[in-house]
Amino acid sequence: MPKRIIIKGGEVTEEKVEKETPIIEPVRIEEKIETPVEEISIVKPVSLEEDKEISEAEIDAETAFDALKKKIEEVKTREKVTQVKFRDQADMSIAILKKILQKWDQLRDEVRKSVAETIEKYRRLKVMYEARFSRLEEDLYFNQIELDTLRELEEQGEPISVSKKEELEKMVPELVKEIAKTDEKLKEIDARIEQLKKMSDNIYEVTAYKELATKLFEEMAAIVQERRGEEALPALRAQIDSIAQREGIPREYATIYVWKKLKKV
């Protein structure tokens, strides 16, 4: 048994002591708390609300365009029926024809108004897609910077949120795709607006029915060429243009008029 030495009044004495079991206290190791970088708010490429608004505007514009095409086809059909009637009815005068054509011109004015309304719908849609494009570009640059920042901090040995890094690595390519799709949509809308503008500027050409007049002209051309040779064609065209100008009727009807006269010869 171990002894404990005690000094009392200059004398040294020994005292037996029981062996003590050493108490080992756990060493408290101060843990290093890793503080991740600040949480990043990531905006999804397209929000459901934004997508719904654009989808509704797109349906509105396309519905207007389809309705416009039907109106155009209706005027064409009326022109076709009128031309056939003018061709087949020997007693149908040009005076009566012109009154009927005035009604079709009124329909063309309505078509022109519909064109203008449809253009406005596509312009509204374009504004919405432009806003989306701008927002997507902003999100793309922000998320690219955040991703590059995380990578830089990671290289420096700093703690980062791995889940946020992975989310950003997935999000950036999605944003690039959405920007490309939005840009393509803007090009399509611009092309449609230009198409509509040309319709408005050439409303008669868009709504005119030309197949019958073309067929009758080819028939007359064969006849006059057989009778007078190739030089007869310019004279035939000049005669048709002259009647169209003199009577104030479209060239298609002037062609039918000349055909009727030629048939009588």
Image: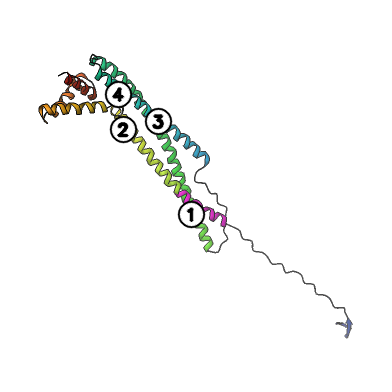
Q: Secondary structure at mark 4?
A: helix
Residue 5 relative to residue 30: left or right: right
Q: Residues within 10 Å of mark 3 (few under 14, many from 20)?
A: few
> Which amino acid type corresponds to the residue marked 3 in the rendered image?
Asp
Q: Secondary structure at mark 1?
A: helix
Q: Secondary structure at mark 2?
A: helix
Query: Residue 66 — which label?
Result: 3
Residue at the spot of label 2: 198
Residue at the spot of label 4: 80
Taking depth in this image into account, of 118 and 214 the one nearest to the observer is 214
N-terminal of the pair, mark 1 or mark 4, is 4
Tag 1 near tag 4, CB within 8 Å: no
Residue at the spot of label 1: 145
Tag 3 near tag 4, CB within 8 Å: no
N-terminal of the pair, mark 3 or mark 4, is 3
Q: Is residue 237 visible?
A: no
* Residue 90 falls within the magenta-colored stretch: no
Taking depth in this image into account, of 44 and 70 the one nearest to the observer is 70
Residue 15, horizontal then vertical, whole percent: 89, 82
N-terminal of the pair, mark 4 or mark 2, is 4
Question: Disc 3 and disc 4: Cα gap in Å?
Answer: 21 Å
**Mark 4, mark 2: which one is toward the viewer?**
4
Residue 58, horizontal then vertical, whole percent: 44, 35
Query: Residue 166 — which label?
Result: none
